[in-house]
């Protein structure tokens, strides 16, 4: 809890994703009480399936990273997945990228175009 609070204080993110399993549940409660904007994350697939889903964003050029050694190291770790022993960092990246996509903060070329959106028509159910 202390490390999570310190990381939040240092980086001040808009939201903190925490996996809603085992120790994550108590961490969610503790951080909420401390005023940290946490979002519970319940994975619906295994790590490999989530990484595969997020890989389309990378392949499509939707994820940008700074030209820094640490970023290039991170990309190398992600590219080596699942053979790399540190799969937790890949899972962390995957969770963030999928959160951006599901929250419509980030798009993919196969997503529906906003210009093609049609307002749903109201219907009456009983005559």
Image (cartoon, grey):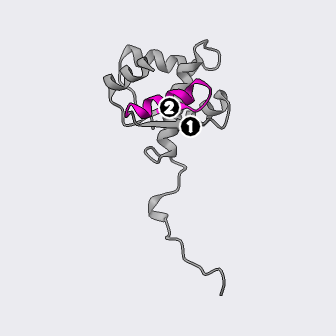
Q: Position of residue 104 (x, y in %)?
A: 46, 48
Q: What residue is shown with label 2?
A: 28
Q: Residue furthest bottom?
A: 127
Choose mark 2 or mark 1, whichever is in front.
Answer: 2
Q: CA distance from mark 2 to mark 1?
A: 30 Å
The relative height of residue 52 versus residue 89 in the rendered view (above or below) is below
Q: Nearer the viewer, residue 126 or 84?
A: 126
User: Can you see residue 108?
Assistant: no
SS at mark 1 in the image: helix
Residue beneath the point at 52% across and 26% down:
92
Pick the residue in front: 91 or 15: 15
Q: Position of residue 20 (x, y in %)?
A: 58, 33
Residue 25 is covered by the magenta coloring:
yes
Residue at point 39% right, 27% down?
65
Checking the image for residue 116, the label placed there is none
Query: In which quadrant of the rendered view does residue 69 lie?
Result: top left
Which sits in the foreground, 67 or 17?
17
Q: Residue at x 53, y 37 (%)?
A: 40
Query: For mark 1, what is the residue?
Result: 56
Residue range corresponding to the magenta coloring: 17-35
């Amino acid at each position: 809890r202390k490390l999570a609070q310190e990381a939040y204080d240092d980086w001040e993110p808009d939201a903190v994703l925490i996996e809603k399993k085992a120790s994550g549940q108590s961490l969610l409660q503790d951080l909420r009480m401390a005023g940290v904007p946490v979002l519970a994350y319940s994975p619906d697939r295994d790590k490999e399936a989530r990484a595969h889903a997020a890989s389309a964003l990378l392949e499509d050029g939707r994820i940008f990273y700074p030209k820094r050694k640490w970023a290039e190291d991170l990309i190398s770790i992600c590219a080596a997945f699942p053979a790399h022993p540190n799969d937790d960092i890949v899972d962390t990246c995957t969770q963030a990228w999928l959160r951006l996509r599901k929250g419509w903060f980030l798009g993919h070329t196969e997503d529906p175009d906003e210009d093609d959106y049609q307002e749903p028509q109201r219907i009456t159910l009983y005559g």
